[in-house]
Amino acid sequence: MKRIEIILGDITKLQVDAIVNAANTTLLGGGGVDGAIHRVAGPGLLEECRKLQGCPTGEAKITGGYCLPARYVIHTVGPVYRDGKQGEPELLASCYRNSLRLAVAHHLKTLAFPCISTGVYRFPKGKAAGIALREIGDFLVHHTDFEKITAVCFEEEDYRLYRQLVKKMGLES
Ligand code: AR6
């Protein structure tokens, strides 16, 4: 399935309909990919985020892209990983599903995801990659008009894991 693309790089540079932000429940910025997105988007993004009044874990909200090459930013809040028995896998899957649902509602056709929760929130990378690719793969099967979903790996380790898994899961032609 060529509509899944795995790349090693910086999500803020992608010219897609929307990039997904791994935010926190305040939606008021932070470190990691969230910090990078706000830095490139500029102050207009924070201003719009303030009006959203936060976002619960596992859910997603959409804003404009401001100075980013992407038209929109979909902010989702991944779970903080504790022991894997506090609903973390289900919440992570919800992040992907709710982000994709918003993309459809806004008639978007190209979307890029970072490796949600695998940084500061410490979700084990292999497990997170499996959940991400399962949700993305399922979505594309049911949305044949969606053009492309890019999984953006910022770290070599994530890139290797995604490449391995995408083959193992039969998501690549
Ligand atoms: N492009 C793509 N991926 C990136 C980039 C980038 N420019 N920068 C970092 N990553 P994290 P989380 C990767 O910590 O674990 C923030 O402070 C990074 O290598 O950004 O969901 C929020 O405000 C890692 O693989 O997000 C929250 O408080 C992945 O993005 C908290 O961190 C996710 O790492 C969210 O933690």
Image (tube, grey):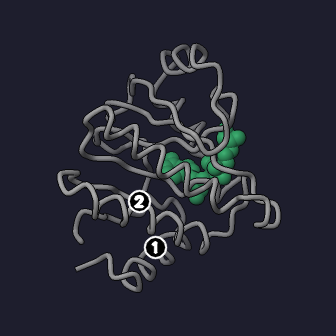
Q: Quadrant of residue 26?
A: top right
Task: Return the residue at label 2.
Answer: 151
Q: Residue at x 49, y 22 (%)?
A: 42
Furthest residue toward left: 145
The x and y percentages for residue 50 are: 61, 16
Relative to 47, residue 7 above or below: below
The x and y percentages for residue 51 are: 57, 13
Relative to 136, residue 33 above or below: above
Q: Secondary structure at mark 2?
A: strand
Label 1 neighbourhood size at 10 Å, few (<14), some (14-19), many (20+)? many
Q: Secondary structure at mark 1?
A: helix
Relative to 170, residue 94 above or below: above
Furthest residue toward right: 83
Q: Earlier in the sequence, mark 2 or mark 1?
A: 2
Q: Residue at x 64, y 19 (%)?
A: 53
Task: Return the residue at label 1.
Answer: 162
Find out if the beta carbon at label 1 lies less than 8 Å from the nearest ligand 1 atom: no
Q: Quadrant of residue 29?
A: top right
Looking at the image, residue 48 sits to the left or right of residue 68; the answer is: right
Q: Residue at x 24, y 44 (%)?
A: 109
Label 2 neighbourhood size at 10 Å, few (<14), some (14-19), many (20+)? many
Q: Residue at x 31, y 32 (%)?
A: 106
Pick the front one: 80 or 87: 87
- Mark 1 residue type: Tyr
Looking at the image, residue 107 sits to the left or right of residue 165; the answer is: left
Pointer 2 with pointer 1, Cβ within 8 A = yes
